Amino acid sequence: MNMIETLSRGLPPLLATAEADTGPMVLAGVLLSLVVIYIASKLGGELSRLLDLPPVLGELVGGVLVGISALHFLVFPESGATASDSLLMGILQQLGDLSPQGVQEVFSTQSEVVSLLAELGVIVLLFEIGLESDLRELQKVGYQAIIVAIFGVAVPFGAGTIGLMTLFGMSAVPAIFAGAALTATSIGITSKVLSELGYLKSSEGQIILGAAVIDDVLGIIVLAVVASLAKTGEVDVMNILYLILSASGFLLGSILLGKVFNKSFVAIAEKLKTRGNLVIPAFIFAFLMAFLANVIQLEAILGAFAAGLVLDETDKRKELDKQVMPIADILVPIFFVSVGAKTDLSVLNPTIPANRAGLVVAAFLIVVAIIGKIMTGWTVFGRPGINRLAIGVGMIPRGEVGLVFAGVGSASGALSESLEAAIIMMVIITTFLAPPFLRFAFKSSTPPEEAESVESESKQPMSS
Amino acid sequence: MNMIETLSRGLPPLLATAEADTGPMVLAGVLLSLVVIYIASKLGGELSRLLDLPPVLGELVGGVLVGISALHFLVFPESGATASDSLLMGILQQLGDLSPQGVQEVFSTQSEVVSLLAELGVIVLLFEIGLESDLRELQKVGYQAIIVAIFGVAVPFGAGTIGLMTLFGMSAVPAIFAGAALTATSIGITSKVLSELGYLKSSEGQIILGAAVIDDVLGIIVLAVVASLAKTGEVDVMNILYLILSASGFLLGSILLGKVFNKSFVAIAEKLKTRGNLVIPAFIFAFLMAFLANVIQLEAILGAFAAGLVLDETDKRKELDKQVMPIADILVPIFFVSVGAKTDLSVLNPTIPANRAGLVVAAFLIVVAIIGKIMTGWTVFGRPGINRLAIGVGMIPRGEVGLVFAGVGSASGALSESLEAAIIMMVIITTFLAPPFLRFAFKSSTPPEEAESVESESKQPMSS
């Protein structure tokens, strides 16, 4: 039990061993990380709102401020940081009288826990977004979303790969990898901004969301193709086929099954009489779907989104929305602040010579990334008067998915260091530009239907 | 980024390495653990309610069922289990094609994460209990609580130690250790049962809660004394003094400081306009207090309880109660189910010869544990008509604190294996008997004021 370690700390000079010492320090580290994350998210979010920008941008910037790029409160081992790079670990070491090895252990466990809380955060975010989305509305815009997604993958991929080969004289494999990194939209950032602006339920919002989901699936498939190409020089057709079938099977199957499960869910929630009678069955379903999506090699967030869509169809959705909201409020900021904290802005520094080659390539990738997605707005057919600019802009942020490409590419040896840095720059810029761009794109549009949105920039309803 | 690992799983035969493989599997393991925990807590809680017992008893039993004693879904390395003992890990290994070393890594990280979520669960529980408690009411019963706590520590300690030395011929150090293990009440279990029965705000409930908090502090001091005695044969007076001063300083200081902080908290929450404007500042305060308590070598839950008490004094408390509730609903069951899952019932098996010696000692300890605490009810003065039996019974569960003594004692070599097993049995029996006993003790009492209790066995308010 961790409690054993907790209390045995009452007697440091007597019974403490390196091992027994780390348990309560991990708890202390996680608590302090959460305090830092919450302060960064609130300061950033509120400042962002005062500047009339989407709060999530402020949360990302708040994360950058406390992260690897600036204050070093919150750093993660994945970026190559060790415990001695972490200000927070320094504080704990002072307070807890830890050995160097003990600190390293606490640092690695604490980082794992915070990263996992961040992953639960984005899972709950997508569950909430699913609850706020309307399956019927999504089906109505389904064809448009598919077209937007396919163009939004094909155009940046093609333009990026060909541009790098012709303009920069790169060989095929790294060019294809970098082109592939331009494909997938970050659902988390886009959907959060849409929700904050009150446009999630608009046609534009639903097309963006639908396209982003399909995009994500296409991105996973592209990654599989590209990575097998980089590794063996040929494509593992069976694996690709498996991915395509399992992805479409999962999404369609969960929606069909959901229509049946709806009624059982309400019946179960009504039978239960102890606390959490609604929210616990809902989370069982959401986490189970996230688990299944993860296990069939999709992303966990897709499962959570599908679970939200299914439960949105029930009579209980308003009550559920209300109860999921505070849970999302405390988990979701962990995700956005962590994304910011993990962003290493030093790759943008032009005074470091190694960055300069990357900067030119990065500039090219950024232009392709932005223009390639903005164009997709004009592929939407049969929707006169729709805000095409907003749809294109909504697809811009690459977020974590782009970083995945950079990471896999560098691990497989296909990417040079400067090309990897260029991809990371592209991800940073598209992620941070999308929220203000999206706000701008919607400025010219009709005002959103405020009515039902659970997420708005205004205060939460305070009293019943 | 963990996401890098998540996606790289799209291509197992190509890029997967043991290291890159574990990230998404840890997420999958945590998600599946949470699903198992939630199902066990709901099945157990609802069955318990049908049998007219407190739901938390069912959650504990549900935990036992999925844990080390029965189904082996949820096992923890602290109990000596390895990945191969875990059914859940077996499932993941099948699904994820993990190497034996990879499974062990996933198992250990996943266990750390679930244990930490459980600790956050009990922190949020005590924060909620603090929010539900009334500081003025607690102050009114302060003297009675102190008397109850002191007697509740002294009587079982004295009777246990002397009994073991005279009746069983034990030497002083192990007898003192076992006696000390009889002292501290588990706040988590007692407060949850009180809350479920609707008696948290009664005079009895407030005395029990106050006494349990003081008990916990006394328990930490007793542990320090006993452990230093066991280790060096003498008492480290400075450390004991430090603990006494820091504990009383922390509790009194936080309450005094809180009276000032109250108004700033409300002012801050009213200034904030983005989502989570109330719940995030509240959690910053709660986690900061928990961190501070942890750092000055108290328990984190005492800090969270103090934070809840302070915020209970603000105008925002009803809104805050409402928002903390669903958060507690999803975190608190992780604690209770984990406690159950970590409980190894095999020490109770009389067919194993090694258990028999322990069983006789255990029977003695259990009798002392129960009678020693029940007597404390009759030390309450100046409160005619109070339910003395309920107060005594409320102090019975030893929960995790007793296990801490067993763990520290066995680590220091002061306890024989059979004495350690006897202490664990005492903890199991008092923990599991307290909920039904407490229900019985309150049966003869006047019904609780239903009105304001956020925690009741009935359904949550479903609509605004």
Image: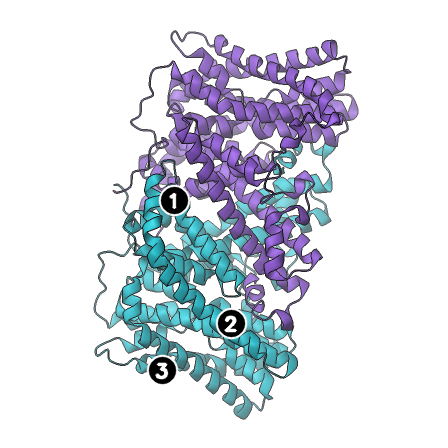
Chain colours: A cyan, B purple
User: What amino acid does circle 3 point to?
Assistant: Met
For mark 3, what is the residue?
A: A375
Q: Are marks 3 and 2 on the same chain?
A: yes
Pair 1/3: label in front: 3
Residue positioned 43% across, 58% down in the render: A304
C-alpha span from label 1 to label 2: 40 Å
Determine the secondary structure under disc 3.
helix
Classify 10 Å Cα crowding around label 3: few (below 14), some (14-19), many (20 and above): many
Q: Horizontally, is B264 left or right of B428 in the view?
A: left
For mark 1, what is the residue?
A: B279
In the picture, which quadrant includes the N terminus of chain B?
Answer: bottom right
Determine the secondary structure under disc 2.
helix
C-alpha span from label 1 to label 3: 41 Å
Residue positioned 52% across, 13% down in the render: B374
Q: Horizontally, is B178 left or right of B278 in the view?
A: right
Q: Position of residue B79 (x, y in %)?
A: 67, 38
In the picture, which quadrant includes the C terminus of chain B?
Answer: top left
Residue positioned 23% across, 59% down in the render: A450
Mark number, residue A243: 2
Q: Position of residue B180 (x, y in %)?
A: 65, 20
Q: Are marks 1 and 3 on the same chain?
A: no
Q: Position of residue B412 (x, y in %)?
A: 75, 30
Occupied quadrant, residue B185: top right
Q: Are marks 1 and 2 on the same chain?
A: no
Residue B315 visible? The answer is yes
Q: How many marks?
A: 3
Q: Horizontally, is B321 left or right of A26 in the view?
A: left
Determine the secondary structure under disc 1.
helix
Precedes in sequence: disc 3 or disc 2 = 2
Work out whether residue A255 or residue B25 is closer to the camera in this orientation and state it: A255
Work out whether residue B31 or residue B220 is closer to the camera in this orientation and state it: B31
User: What amino acid does circle 2 point to?
Assistant: Leu
